Image: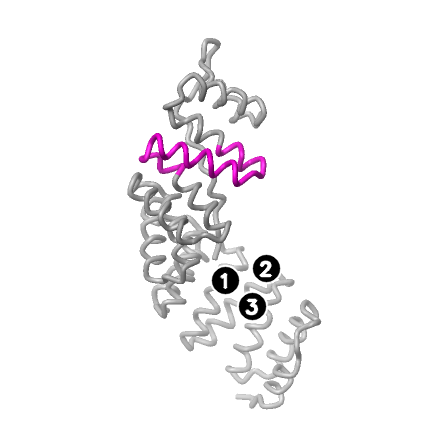
Amino acid sequence: MIAHMLTQLALWVLAAGAGAGPLERGEALLEKGDLSGARTAFSEAQRAAPKDARPYYYLGVIAEKQGDPRAASTHYEKAVALDPKLAEAWTNLSALDLAAGRPDDALKAALRATAARPDSFEAWFNLGLVHDALKRHAEAIRAYSSALKQKPNDLDTLVNLGAAERRAGSLDGAIGHFQQAVRLAPKDAQAHYNLGACLSDAGKLDDAAREIRTAVTIDAKYALAWCRLASVELKRGRCEGARAAFAEFFKLAPKSPRGEADDALKACKPR
């Protein structure tokens, strides 16, 4: 499962002129990466307009960037209390809850985000991550599919959707999305590995071997891919190929137990 950096930064004002107020100054400073200056400006905006959700939201973004998730959650909670339709704050709050090991709270916030902004890619993608964490595969598939409608060529969404479909036993759908991921990123080792693993599950061993070999050609240190390639080669009756793949795997993972691999190689019957 791949996770996007889900801290949302919604800029409501595009320019900050000489006479700009504290909110606009804060936005400009945040865009420049001046977190301290932005925090001062947003705190001023908060005091000037205590019922405006935006300064609280921005203070949450800054707290996240400064590595203070507890403070960030507090700011986001205040923001959504003032503006329940602020999807960016709900999404960020959900991501923080998920990272903190509170998937049920994360789900509630993620659902609020998609309800507030049905066209938000980030909200749907994050909802998929939450459903994944809860092992709700069908729901994860629906969420990632909704995210893909907003960004049809997003690589991470394609990979996560394919992985969710594979876990749900929908191999044809998974293979299709992994193939799309490979077309988008032909030099991405993980995309080729995922496609190969799914093809192997579907019994398409020759195609699986080709894709996984491509993965280790791109990334020769991809230990998991070497191990899976050895397994595929064993199923194909390519004993020497399996032996060579296991050798590469154990170079990269020398502490892994060898007994099962040795037994499989002894039992291998060339075809």
The quadrant in which residue 263 appears is: bottom right
- Which of the two labelled residues, at mark 1 and mark 2, occupies the earlier sequence position? 1
| Cα gap from disc 1 to disc 2, whole angstroms | 9 Å
Q: Which residues are magenta?
A: 60-89
Q: Secondary structure at mark 1?
A: helix
The quadrant in which residue 251 appears is: bottom right
Task: Give x and y (percent) for residue 201.
Answer: 43, 74
Instruction: Tell me, yes or no, whether the highlighted magenta stretch contains residue 75.
Output: yes
Looking at this view, name the residue that lies furthest to the top. Answer: 19
Task: Give x and y (percent) for residue 50.
Answer: 40, 22
Query: What's the residue at 37%, 24% (across, down)?
Result: 52
Q: Is residue 244 left or right of residue 215?
A: right
- Which of the two labelled residues, at mark 2 and mark 3, occupies the earlier sequence position? 3
Q: Which mark, residue 192? A: 1
**Is 104 in front, or is 196?**
104
Q: Are marks 1 and 2 in contact (CB under 8 Å)?
A: yes
Residue position marked by numbered label 2 in the rendering: 218
Residue position marked by numbered label 3 in the rendering: 213
Instruction: Tell me, yes or no, whether the highlighted magenta stretch contains residue 246.
Output: no
Type of secondary structure dominating the magenta stretch:
helix
The relative height of residue 12 versus residue 150 in the rendered view (above or below) is above
Q: Secondary structure at mark 3?
A: helix
Query: What's the residue at 46%, 43% (across, down)?
Result: 6
| Cα gap from disc 1 to disc 3, whole angstroms | 9 Å
Query: What's the residue at 54%, 59% (across, down)?
Result: 189
Q: Is residue 115 left or right of residue 125?
A: left
Residue type, label 3: Arg
**Is 259 in front, or is 201?**
259
The crowd level at tag 2 (other Cα within 10 Å; few <14, some 14-19, many 20+) is some
- Which of the two labelled residues, at mark 1 and mark 3, occupies the earlier sequence position? 1
